Image: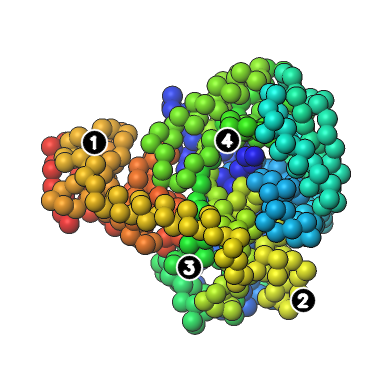
Amino acid sequence: MTTMSDMQDDGEEGEDGLSCSSLWRAGPVPQVFPTLNADLSVDVVIIGAGITGITAAAHIAGTGRTVAVLEMRRVGAGTTGHSTGNLYAVVGEYLYKLAKKWGDDKVFAIVQSRARAIDTIEQNVAAFHLDCNFSRQPLALYSTVDSLSESYDIEAECQAASRAGLDARLTNDLPLPGVIKKAMVVRNQAQFHPLKYVQQLAAAIHSPQCQIYEESPVLHMDAENNIVKTATHKVQADHIILATHTPKGVSVVQTELRPYREYAVAALQNTPQLPGGIFWSTGPDATSTRAVTLDGKSYVMMIGEQHKTGQKNDPEAAYRVLSELLRARFSVQSIDYQWSGQHYRAADGLPYIGSSAGSSRVYIATGFAADGLIYGTVAGKVIADEICGSGNPFAELYSSRRFTPIKSAVNFLKENLNVASHYIKDYTTSAALKSFSKVKRGEGALVDIEGAKLAVYRDDADHLHILSSVCTHLKCIVHWNRAERSWDCPCHGSRFNYDGEIIEGPALLPLQRHDTMTNNNADVAPL
């Protein structure tokens, strides 16, 4: 099942000149928040202004505590603003599979926590008068082929959803083109405009008590003294929340996480064929599909093609596959939007939410898989309750300090063997080019200069951007991502733009820059 609740784009030009930009970014520029311009002392500092950080800020500020939110780019500009906008109490990797690992009682609690998160979002929409197109809609999991395995998935998931208290039923009647062989429908789920939601909620809570800062990346965190630093200023706080998708810096929980990328395309429908609702297909080419109406225009969005970060030779192929599937299933015009995003899967199937293993005053929220809009809302409330001492019924379920070796064993071993294999292979193989002149315009490549592997990108103006290829997180070698013109780390998911600046992941520092050159024949860079 594919959901891609967590996605991010970088605004670069992709295949056929189509910009890699999220559908949600269409429209007027929202309120701009200030950049941090002075040292602060607050009760709570939150790093990251996506749905997790802004949800936590809203709850904490509501108790009278002072809050500062530091965002690297713009509010919602990361994973939140590039999601499907789908809200559901089930999970992307199937409830029945979680039940086999955790039991029906835990799955019931998981579903209840997620259902309450939808209610929280709906309550915020009403309380703060947020114009974000929130509506209750059904979710459908369906198959278009006679397949015993797909039929089993749908039937088992329907049973698990019903046991967890959801209104689920089997059917073969869906408002989709083509023949539906079997489907499960869960009523009373929801959809919204995720970027409008988080931006408007941020604007509603922004005040001297709850200060929100954009373009203020954190470059250093002192967990022992509860201080975070940007390039120019620092914030002292009693508590630090890392609402950053994955913990920044080095954390033991990163050994339990698997970073994945996923892709989306959106096109105008020739005639409205798809009503509101969340539509997940099963099988090897599983996709998530939904309709979106913006400025009176009806779009259809399709998501799929997952792969490990930094481990796909031709990520642009994902856009081609999805575009072909979208055109085959629906009558659409040109593909107007395409983007990709990242999510992190926990080894035991549940997110890590709460105080970190290293400090009781540092809180993390990660491992949401592709279910981040809901788990981000859950995390914001759980962490806020923990800081404020009010208690939360789901805190133990998602505890970031839990130890589940049996439930985690297979994925833990698989992930860390994968990391080790890439580390060894990238340092011992000689796949790098031997000359800068071999790097084509608009392309990036590893170039070996006297035994040093450099990450080199030649821009459209023929300038060379020369970086260290060593990820600043744990020193793996980054790989070039043609689709987004980025350098992606195959070990723990850090991503950097072609000029070395951080886009995503646990890395705190950019890739080391060596030079920018215009000489086509340059073969040596200053090291």
Residue at point 15% right, 48% down?
449
* Residue type (three-letter) at the residue carrying disc 4: Gly
* Residue type (three-letter) at the residue carrying disc 2: Ser
Q: CA distance from mark 4 to mark 3?
A: 29 Å
The reply, left or right, for residue 282 in relation to residue 71 is right
* Residue type (three-letter) at the residue carrying disc 1: Val
User: Pointers 4 and 2 in contact (CB under 8 A)?
Assistant: no
x, y percentage for residue 48?
Answer: 56, 60
Which of 359/244 is in front? Answer: 359
x, y percentage for residue 145?
Answer: 68, 23
Q: Secondary structure at mark 2?
A: loop
User: Pointers 1 and 4 in contact (CB under 8 A)?
Assistant: no
Q: CA distance from mark 1 to mark 3?
A: 35 Å
Q: CA distance from mark 2 to mark 3?
A: 27 Å
Q: CA distance from mark 1 to mark 4?
A: 30 Å
Residue beneath disc 3: 251
| Numbered badge on residue 439 | 1
Residue beneath disc 2: 390
Residue beneath disc 4: 304
User: Pointers 2 and 3 in contact (CB under 8 A)?
Assistant: no
The crowd level at tag 1 (other Cα within 10 Å; few <14, some 14-19, many 20+) is: many
